[in-house]
Amino acid sequence: MTTRDSFPYLIDNIFGEFEMASQVRIDCIAVEKNIEFHPAAPIRVVAINGMDPGLEFLHQIRHLKSETLQMFRNVIPHVSQADLDNFVDLAMRRIRRMARAVSLIGFDPKEKSIDKDSFWSVEQMQCFVEGTESDDALVYLEAMFQTSRPAWVYYLELKKLEERIRSLAGGVIFLPATTPGVPVVKQYEKFRLNCSVSFLGAWLRMACDRDLIERPNISGLCRHFSENYCTARQENISPRSLRNHIDNPSPEALEEVMMELHSWGKYGAKFIEQQRR
């Protein structure tokens, strides 16, 4: 059975990917001011967390909800009945924290739709105009209005996740007991990287900025490396940690990448000479 000491780690692992989506990066482009609509700032939102604000964002949030629910479903049979309330309480706290990403104004449960009254919380937002982070309050205000519907979508999917988790927790007594002592079969070996996570994040950031990886879904990219790669020091790469290193690579890590690329250049020159013989 899973012990209480491991609950914080399990909760981080279960909700980590979905929680990353609550740290919202909004990319905008500058447009001419439209006198008819009088926008707070002449910008247009083109991406949320690297995705189109429409169906692409919706599909990602639904995918994250499905993955989170599946991980919770896999873990909960291993939690003892005596500790179940504590584990579920931790899960509910995490969901409430994630819900703070959206501010609801004039919420009325009887209303069928309130998307015009749901906005990303300023504390959870980063706005970029033409690739440069903005500190203009009017840009943030306009971005909040233009992304009202995606914020409502995120909130609804999060509430659906909360309902399903409560339902699973309530029905756990009907789940079959797991057979003790049966080892988990590992389906495949991860590819081992001889570099640090900070180095990997800096290299991926440079690859994305140089369009070597074109229009990447950064969250999906982090999940891919987490699931398929490991380092000499870390058997499991945290998607959140990798995302942090991609978003904000350290100068030291960037210097390491530059030195490695310089070594590649020397190796490549010798390789070319060898192949021409």
Image (cartoon, rainbow, N blue to C red):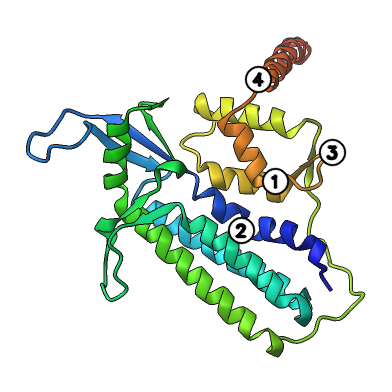
Amino acid found under the numbered disc labelled 4 = Leu
Front of the two marks 4 and 2: 2
- Residue shown at 56% from the left, 32% from the top: 247
Circle 3 is placed at which residue position? 233
Mark 1 vs 2: CB contact within 8 A: no
The image quarter in which residue 265 lies:
top right
Left or right: where 59 falls relative to 98:
left
From mark 4 to mark 2, how far is it between C-alphas? Answer: 30 Å
Q: Residues within 10 Å of mark 1 (few under 14, many from 20)?
A: many
Q: Nearer the viewer, residue 193 or 144?
A: 144
Reading the chain from its start, which is encountered first: label 1 or label 3? 3
In the current view of this chain or complex, which residue is farthest to the front?
A: 106
Mark 1 vs 3: CB contact within 8 A: no
Q: Residues within 10 Å of mark 2 (few under 14, many from 20)?
A: many
The answer to whether residue 49 shows anywhere in this view is no
Left or right: where 74 falls relative to 180:
left
Reading the chain from its start, which is encountered first: label 2 or label 3? 2
Say which mark, if any, is on residue 238.
1
- Residue shown at 65% from the left, 39% from the top: 242
From mark 4 to mark 3, how far is it between C-alphas? Answer: 20 Å
Amino acid found under the numbered disc labelled 2 = Phe
